[in-house]
Amino acid sequence: MAPDPDEREKISPGRAVASGAAVALVVGAVYVATLAPTVLPYDTPYTLDSPMLQAAVPVLGVGHPTGYPTYMMLTHLFTYLPLGDAAYRVNLASAAYGAVAVAAVYAAGLLLSRRAVAAAAGSLAFGFSGAFWSQAVIAEVYTMNALFVALFLCLILLWRERRDAGVLLVAALVSGLSLTHHLSSGLLVPAGLLFVALVDRSTFSEARFLLKGLGAFALGLLPMLYLPVRASMDAPLNEADPSTPDRFLNLVTGGSFLAESSEAGRQCSPSALSLDGPVAKLASFGREILGQFPLAFLAFGAFGAAYLLLRDRAAAGLLGVIFLGSLLHGFAYLWLGIEDFAAFLIPGLLALSLCACAGIDLLLRPMDDLRAAPGRALPVVLSSVLLATPLVGVWISYGGMDRGDAYEGRRAVEAVVRNAEKDATVLHHRSPLWYTVLVEERRRDLTLVDPFCTSWNRRTDLVWPDDLTAAQSAARYGTDDTTGVEAARKAARRGPVYVLDHGRVDYDRFREAGLDPAPVGDGRQLRELVPRTDAR
């Protein structure tokens, strides 16, 4: 049963907007204060894709699976801001999406609990959860994904309150738009359908309205057209080349992840996440979940979820599908050894934070009728504690989340720009060198070769400046050998060859091939592969 507005706290629109704006400003200010200042390195667990996104967004490229067309187009607008370098502006977009997502979580929490304190505390806890905060300070796609999820939840809860068909159509549009960004948003479809069925099953009997809903959903999918159109325009960075129907479907469905080549000698570097056995993986998964919120907010979330199951089955079903689906998605990635699996838990954390809003409301509800002193001071004190708890967590987590001194990517760029000889070849893997040549247009004399393993069918991110198919690249540069040895051998015949270390380079293989890695500059990131005179 849905909450009765007459039995709950009345909140003026002005107060609601002011409280939501204050929450967004607080988290936004913290995100900006801890934001990465420039281009990021390829690194585990969270910046595996950041350097490529920072290169693709300014030049309107086509990203890795699933392409992220909405992200590419919207984030490109941030690159026109007169702030920092282009990479910083892409980072800033993540912070902006994150702050707006937290405001949308606040609005959804307000609709669910009808209590500003509960909505503010729950949204602050979500905004400062480790998984979400970590994504709000780098170039990544997950804060925009959370924004779509939160906006959808806000709209569909608003529809229940107002029974306005137009609001439900906008929710359908947002669910379609969210699928152009991240496949995990597919959870919104069954969650939303279940919610509507539990609130008002008769909605599905209106054929004309259903057609409108399908039309709104399809309209939300239109940004997908960006991918083949931009690919056909020879985008400067086109990782998966969705210019044909089969490649387009492989890209947007994530099928490209399964297209890893299996030729002889193609052995991927092992994942940095090495957990042996299901017990270790379950333990790691449990620690990740339990470490996201203060313990009290986990209790509020469990308490609120139990209450919703008993009194508001529609909301329980809506949030439950997203929570459980997100956890299964994240655990599947953990099981496969994917380092950044925690980012896939964010929609579930969002759902749990809304359950916490309901739990906090239940805690405060008995105090609504306190009128006489000193009793009337109790809800004020308790509300203050609830709001302060996530902020205390900020003080504890700030150092670990602060990316303000993250200049590793810039140091890698400068190591190559200053030390690599003219017309040299640099072996690298999804590094900030793409940003260097495409966005900053520096060292365009270099040949950049990426022979190292990536788990999808790649296109133009294999070699700069050549636009080659994978087979052509393998024949000319030896990129079918994912150890990099064959690429280094072929490059050494043409001139100097370097390796920009991405943390998983096996230098012993180069030594065995007669190529000695000699440190260049400070030796921390760049090494020259020098052929031994006695090498055969």
Image: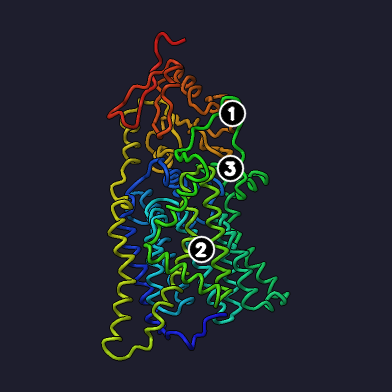
In primary-sequence order, the first of circles 3 and 1 is 3
Which residue in the protein does label 3 denote? Answer: 257
Rounded to the nearest angstrom, the CA distance separating label 3 from label 1 is: 21 Å
Q: Secondary structure at mark 2?
A: helix
Of the residues shown, which amino acid type is indicated by label 2? Phe
Rounded to the nearest angstrom, the CA distance separating label 3 from label 2 is: 24 Å
Of the residues shown, which amino acid type is indicated by label 3? Phe
Residue nearer the viewer, 394 or 218: 394
Numbered mark located on residue 472 in the image = 1
Q: Position of residue 457 (x, y in %)?
A: 59, 38
In primary-sequence order, the first of circles 1 and 2 is 2
Residue drawn at 40 percent across, 34 percent down:
503
Figure quadrant of residue 32: bottom left
Q: Secondary structure at mark 3?
A: helix
Which residue in the protein does label 2 denote? Answer: 148
Disc 3 or disc 1, which is closer to the eye?
3
Residue nearer the viewer, 284 or 242: 284
Of the residues shown, which amino acid type is indicated by label 1? Gln
